[in-house]
Amino acid sequence: MSRFGPPVSVRSVDMTVGFRCRGSPNINHLLGVSSPKPLRPCISLQPVFEYRHSPSTGLITAKSSRREKRVAFADAKGLSLITVRLFSEKEDKIPREPVKIPRLKKLGCTKETVNKALKLKLGFEQPCRDFQAFRSRLQDHMVVLESCNVTRCSILGTVRVKNVCFEKVVQIRITFDTWRSYKDVPCTYLEQSYGEPGTDVFEFNIGVPERIDPGERIEFCVSYSPAAFSAARWDNNNGDNYCIHVC
């Protein structure tokens, strides 16, 4: 067949083409071809809404092929459209009891009102300032004033005594008018004792009168009456008494 080169043999090739016919399923079976499955539609069906206009109510309602929605008013069901609430100008007054505020009482004050011009000042040094002399007096007299402080309305301090027996009485004898009159004020036992072993501590708090003449002298001394002794023991500041000046 060719003019140049060696002869080339040509063979016929049989080509078989399969056709798919809708009406002939046997052809697909003979050809060994399976029928394709139907594809999923890409377009989904949306619900169709139908809009209606009501001339009586003036509302537009939508009606779906799947679900129907309705609008109803309260008066259609026998309910009231208006809620009325009345308010009174006068409020109900609840009776309240007056709150009672407790008043703090000052220690040692005889009255609530104290003369602000009154000032008290100690006329002696603190007894425990000289500790050696303080211990010596305690051994000799068995009772000694340990500390003392003054305010505008009270005189307070502590007394130390030797513990010679269980029953004992400790008092402060004080005068506010230069010994024309006096009174004995009992001291209170202080449970949490400290300091010298074998001793007890008592405390006192004496109220000062509201009015005191600056010309008068405030003096006091300490008495100790243990049950084991018939006579009381005294601490009177070596005979000078403990004096407080009125300023």
Image (cartoon, rainbow, N blue to C red):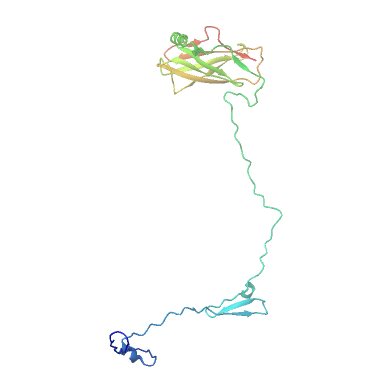
Task: Identify the image quadrant of the N terminus.
Answer: bottom left
Choose between 223 and 121: the one closer to the eye: 121
**174 horizontally vs 86: left or right:** left
Q: From what the image shows, is residue 127 above or below residue 76?
A: above
- Residue 221's spot in the image, x, y percent? 54, 12
Position of 86 relative to 112 (above/below): below
**Image x and y of residue 61, in percent:** 61, 77
Q: Is residue 226 visible?
A: no
Q: Nearer the viewer, residue 104 or 189?
A: 104
Q: Residue at x 46, y 19 (%)?
A: 201
Nearest the eye: 188 or 87? 87
Name the spot of residue 78 as percent of width and height, x first: 63, 74
What residue is shown at x 63% (from left), y 18% (from top)?
A: 119
At which x and y percent is residue 105?
59, 28
What residue occupies the far bottom of the structure in this picture?
Answer: 23
* Number of marks: 0
Name the quadrant containing residue 247. top right
Q: Nearer the viewer, residue 87 or 208?
A: 87
Q: Is residue 30 above or below residue 71?
A: below
